C-alpha cells in the first residue's frame, strides 16, 4: 500500500512539483507514495467558486471560509479516514524531526494549505486539524511548506534512500546538528581536509565527528543544545540526574 499524500490547495498544479524528481520522484513512479492534490475551489457553492471573505472585525486581506474548508476536509476524511489532517500555518506548532518520523511511519497525511490571511479559526474547533509551522518565516501560502514536509517524510519511507542507515546521522536525528563533511581534493585553495579524517582510525574519526556535532550545535543552535543536554541528563525513569553538589 502506498503512503498517501492528499493536499488541499488552491494551486494543485504545484504538486508534485520538485517531488517529481530525484529520490522522491523515483519513489512516486514506483508507487512507494501517491500524490493526490485536491482543489479547494471544487467545494465552493456559488458560481464564482468563492473560497474566502473579508475578515470579521475589519482589516486587510481575505480569510479562507470555514464551511468551504470543512467540506474539503470531510471529502478527504471520507476517502482516507485514518490519515492525520495537518494545516500549514505560522500559528502552528514548530515541526520537529520526531513528528516527521511519526507522520512518515503512518499511512500518509492530508495537508491543508493556507492562502491570504489564513484560515477561519473555527475550522480548528470543528474538525480534527493539527496546526504545524515550518519555521518563523512568512510564505505566500502553505504549498511550499507542504512540499517541504512531504519531502522530509518521503525520504524516510522504506527503500527511498539507498542505504537503511543513510539518514541516521543527519542533523536533528540525534538532537544535534550533523558534523561537517569533506571530500577530495585533500587541499583546496590552501584549506585542508582535517588530518583525523585522513588517518584511517575509525575510533578517532567517530570521536571527532561527535565532538564537532556537539560544538557546532552549542555554538550555532543553543536552543537545540539546551534540549539535548536536558534529554541526556534524564535517567531511564525520566527523573533528572543529580549534578555534583545537588541535594535531594
Image (spheres, rainbow, N blue to C red):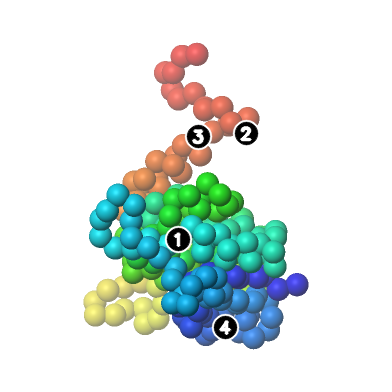
Which residue sits at x=56%, y=49%? 126
Disc with the residue nearer the chain's start (4 vs 1): 4
Residue 236: assigned label: 2
Q: Mark 1, residues whose alpha carbon is within 10 Å: few (<14), some, or many (≥20)?
A: many
Q: Quadrant of the N terminus?
A: bottom right
Q: Is residue 80 above or below residue 10?
A: above
Q: Is residue 208 visible?
A: no
**Residue ID for mark 4:** 25
For the residues labelled 1 and 2, the Cα–Cα distance comes to 47 Å
Give the residue furthest to the front: 47
Which residue sits at x=51%, y=64%? 68
Q: Is residue 128 above or below residue 178?
A: above
**Residue ID for mark 1:** 65
Q: Quick one: 87 or 102, which is closer to the camera? A: 87
Disc with the residue nearer the chain's start (1 vs 3): 1
Q: Quick one: 50 or 47, which is closer to the camera? A: 47
Q: Quick one: 142 or 165, which is closer to the camera? A: 142
Q: Position of residue 227 (x, y in %)?
A: 44, 42
Disc with the residue nearer the chain's start (4 vs 2): 4
Closer to the camera: disc 3 or disc 4?
4
Element on which disc 1 rests: loop
| Disc 4 to disc 1: CB gap under 8 Å | no
| Disc 1 to disc 3: CB gap under 8 Å | no
Q: Is residue 87 left or right of residue 218?
A: right
For the residues labelled 1 and 3, the Cα–Cα distance comes to 47 Å
Q: Is residue 61 visible?
A: yes
Q: Mark 3, residues whose alpha carbon is within 10 Å: few (<14), some, or many (≥20)?
A: some
Amino acid at each position: 500500500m502506498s503512503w498517501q499524500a492528499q493536499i488541499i490547495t488552491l494551486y494543485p498544479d504545484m504538486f508534485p512539483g520538485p517531488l517529481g524528481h530525484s529520490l522522491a520522484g523515483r519513489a512516486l513512479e514506483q508507487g512507494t507514495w501517491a500524490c493526490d492534490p485536491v482543489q479547494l475551489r471544487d467545494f465552493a457553492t456559488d458560481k464564482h467558486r468563492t473560497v474566502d471573505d473579508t475578515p470579521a472585525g475589519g482589516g486587510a486581506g481575505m480569510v479562507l471560509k470555514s464551511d468551504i474548508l470543512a467540506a474539503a476536509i470531510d471529502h478527504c476524511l471520507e476517502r482516507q479516514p485514518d490519515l492525520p489532517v495537518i494545516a500549514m500555518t505560522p500559528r502552528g506548532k514548530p515541526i520537529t524531526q520526531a513528528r516527521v518520523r511519526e507522520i512518515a511511519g503512518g499511512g500518509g497525511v492530508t495537508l491543508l494549505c493556507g492562502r491570504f490571511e489564513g484560515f477561519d479559526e473555527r475550522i480548528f474547533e470543528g474538525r480534527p486539524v493539527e496546526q504545524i509551522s515550518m519555521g518563523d518565516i512568512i510564505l505566500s501560502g502553505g504549498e511550499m511548506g507542504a512540499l517541504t514536509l512531504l519531502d522530509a517524510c518521503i525520504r524516510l519511507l522504506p527503500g527511498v534512500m539507498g542505504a537503511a542507515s543513510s539518514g541516521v546521522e543527519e542533523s536533528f536525528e540525534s538532537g544535534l546538528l550533523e558534523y561537517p563533511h569533506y571530500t577530495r581534493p585533500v587541499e583546496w585553495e590552501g584549506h585542508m581536509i582535517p588530518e583525523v579524517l585522513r588517518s584511517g582510525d575509525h575510533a578517532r574519526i567517530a570521536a571527532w565527528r561527535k565532538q564537532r556535532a556537539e560544538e557546532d550545535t552549542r555554538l550555532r543552535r543553543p536552543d537545540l543544545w539546551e534540549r539535548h543536554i536536558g534529554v541526556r541528563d534524564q535517567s531511564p525513569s525520566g527523573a533528572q540526574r543529580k549534578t555534583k553538589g545537588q541535594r535531594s
